[in-house]
Amino acid sequence: MSVVIIGGNERMACQYKDICKQYHCKAKVFTKLKSGLREQIGNPDLVILFTSTVSHKMVRCALAEADKCNSAVERSHTSSATALKGILSNYCDPS
């Protein structure tokens, strides 16, 4: 399963990827708005938005791409590791 994480804490990007590996998911993490974000998102199965740490422009971009490829979208106000584990446990089995 492929996961795209939008927002979150920059210092936790590697931890987000490690947590996704525990749930057998490939992850892309975007903590800041980059040029070409639309093309980099790709065709994920799940888009996770950490709404407290993300700009409205990034949210709109991510939702437009998720809508194009019929990806599931989950929103979380907190960008903690526990919040990510809770979301992934609804979609994937941990190892």
Image (cartoon, rainbow, N blue to C red):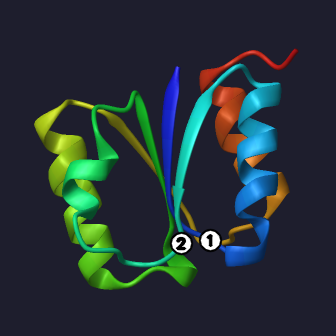
Is disc 2 in contact with disc 1, using a CB cutoff of under 8 Å?
yes
Which residue is painted at 21% across and 30% down in the image?
A: 70
The residue tagged with tag 1: helix, strand or loop? loop
How many numbered markers are drawn?
Answer: 2
Which residue does the image show at 21% across and 57% down from the upper left? 38
Q: Amino acid at mark 2?
A: Thr
Instruction: From the image, state whether disc 2 or disc 1 is nearer to you.
Output: 2
Q: Is residue 94 above or below residue 73?
A: above
Q: Residue at x 49, y 28 (%)?
A: 2
> In the rendered image, which residue does mark 2 sit on?
31
Which residue does the image show at 31% across and 50% down from the upper left? 40
**Dot 2 crowding, Cα within 10 Å, few <14, some 14–19, many 20+:** many
Q: Secondary structure at mark 2?
A: loop
Residue 77, horizontal then vertical, whole percent: 60, 72
Q: Earlier in the sequence, mark 2 or mark 1?
A: 1
Q: Which residue is mark 1?
A: 8
Q: Residue 4: where, in percent of width, then height?
A: 47, 46
